[in-house]
Amino acid sequence: MPTPLLKTPSYESYFHEIQPIEHSDDIISDLYQTSFRSFVFSENQPPLTIRQTSHSLSKLGSSIWSSSLALASYLITHPELISNKNVLELGSGLALPSILSSRLNAKSVTATDYWTDEETDRLIPKEMYKDAIEYNIRINEIQNCKVEKLGENHFFN
């Protein structure tokens, strides 16, 4: 069994900092107040950075939820569960566990979430949601992670 990267399983120990974004190369940062939130999961890897469009509005797709941090904390202490495996994250939000899974040597990762015209609990419009997830994947230089809209094809094939 591989040795855990950190001995402390508490997800609070991974939080590093929040930094405002001064400028960015996409429309989401032009339209919304955004910040970076970085996590240090291993001294041997660069921080994992996630862009949020809100830190306190509790809107879907805008900030990192405690459940994402809890899942990431579990994965970092049990990397053998995803190493060399295909990973499908359902309801990925800002894709923190998906990005971490890629860093922990998953064979491939699919980050999914559900966005529709009727959704009123999201801060950003549905047509920008996939871009928000892909932005977080790109800034972490992840190559083996794709983003898909969660739908029936994930359950009924």
Image (cartoon, rainbow, N blue to C red):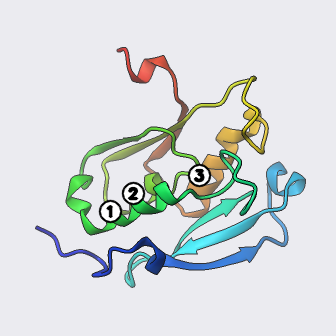
The residue positioned 36% from the left and 45% from the top of the image is 108
Q: Nearer the viewer, residue 134 or 121?
A: 121
User: Is any atom of residue 46 visible in this view?
Assistant: no
Q: Nearer the viewer, residue 12 or 2?
A: 12
Helix, strand, or loop for circle 2? helix
CA–CA distance in space, label 3 to label 1:
17 Å
**From the viewer's perspective, is the residue at label 2 or at label 3 nearer?**
2
Q: Nearer the viewer, residue 107 or 51?
A: 51
The residue positioned 24% from the left and 74% from the top of the image is 4
CA–CA distance in space, label 2 to label 1:
5 Å
Residue 74 is labelled as 1
Is 105 rendered above or below residue 153?
below
Is 95 rendered above or below residue 150?
below
Number of marks in the rendered image: 3
Residue type marked 1: Tyr
Helix, strand, or loop for circle 3? loop
Q: Quadrant of residue 115?
A: top right
Q: Earlier in the sequence, mark 3 or mark 1?
A: 1
The residue positioned 84% from the left and 49% from the top of the image is 27
Extreme residue in the right direction: 31
Q: Which residue is mark 2?
A: 71
Which quarter shows the N terminus? bottom left
Left of 55 or right of it: where is 102? left
Where does residue 135 sit, x and y in percent of width and height? 65, 53
Helix, strand, or loop for circle 1? helix
